[in-house]
Amino acid sequence: GAVVSQHPSWVICKSGTSVKIECRSLDFQATTMFWYRQFPKQSLMLMATSNEGSKATYEQGVEKDKFLINHASLTLSTLTVTSAHPEDSSFYICSASKTGRNEQFFGPGTRLTVL
Amino acid sequence: QKEVEQDPGPLSVPEGAIVSLNCTYSNSAFQYFMWYRQYSRKGPELLMYTYSSGNKEDGRFTAQVDKSSKYISLFIRDSQPSDSATYLCAMTYSGAGSYQLTFGKGTKLSVIP
């Protein structure tokens, strides 16, 4: 199997607070994890690529100080949205690749609503 | 020209029909091709994975890759209402950083009972 979990599945927070989203590969080791955001009726937008033990690589236009990514182990990556604002409200999805493979297995997503 | 073009639909078919979903791409370097299914408010689920040109069959699903035409297809036989979802094509190549995927915009499929 290739199961990826995300926690929480949804979160509502006040503007200015920080939110942490966890992404775990449950039955395999993931050297690489990816973070995406998806707006309604749109495709996935890659935010950053995270390799275990090294700094994440952010896509152009994504603020690394606002979206903090930590990939501390081969099964866990976290995305922290710092000082969240209403425009950060979105569906955040992570994916993970098995070591040596290029297929990505996606988590169920986290819906963030910032009031 | 976008790297990957995919008709967003929506596509409505009666139950039992054969569905054909397609993507075209412009980057001849793409080697690995995937189809994902995404239900509303869920993460994408990997359906099919193929390498280079050729066909691959898995149950009611068949994936085709024609690298000479830069064209990939996903066929769904005996379509079911449970197949109603958005289908995303995705592709990558060994030179892409960490095998980053390039996605199509997705085709929304509705199978009518």
Image: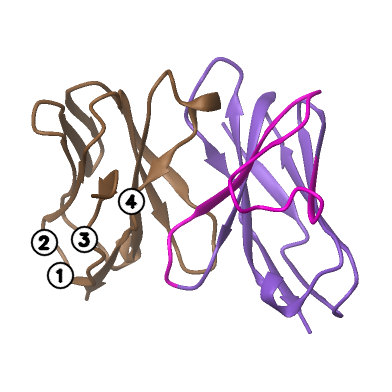
Q: Colour of chain A?
A: purple
Question: Most extreme residue toward the bottom, as rendered?
Answer: A115
Query: Which region is colored magenta?
Result: A41-69
Mark 4 and mark 3 in contact (Cβ < 8 Å)?
Answer: no
Q: CA distance from mark 2 to mark 3?
A: 19 Å
How many other residues sit within 10 Å of disc 2, few (<14), some (14-19) or many (≥20)?
Answer: some
Q: CA distance from mark 2 to mark 1?
A: 6 Å
Residue A61 vs residue A35, the one in the foreground: A61
Please report whichever mark, 3 or 4, sits nearer to the chain's N-terminal start: 3
Question: Above or below — where is A103 with respect to A81?
Answer: above
Q: Based on the picture, tell me whether residue B23 belongs to the magenta stretch.
A: no
Q: CA distance from mark 2 to mark 4?
A: 23 Å
Mark 1 and mark 2 in contact (Cβ < 8 Å)?
Answer: yes
Please report whichever mark, 2 or 3, sits nearer to the chain's N-terminal start: 3
Please report whichever mark, 1 or 4, sits nearer to the chain's N-terminal start: 1
Please report whichever mark, 2 or 4, sits nearer to the chain's N-terminal start: 2
Mark 1 and mark 3 in contact (Cβ < 8 Å)?
Answer: no
- Residue type, mark 1 in image: Val
User: Can you identify the residue that label 1 sits on?
Assistant: B13
Q: Chain of mark 4?
A: B
Q: Based on the picture, tell me whether residue A49 belongs to the magenta stretch.
A: yes
Residue B12 seen in the current view: yes
Mark 4 and mark 1 in contact (Cβ < 8 Å)?
Answer: no
Q: In the image, what residue occupies the spot 32% across and 66% down? A: B84
The color scheme shown is by chain
To the question of a shared chain for discs 1 and 4, the answer is yes
Residue B17 is tagged as 2
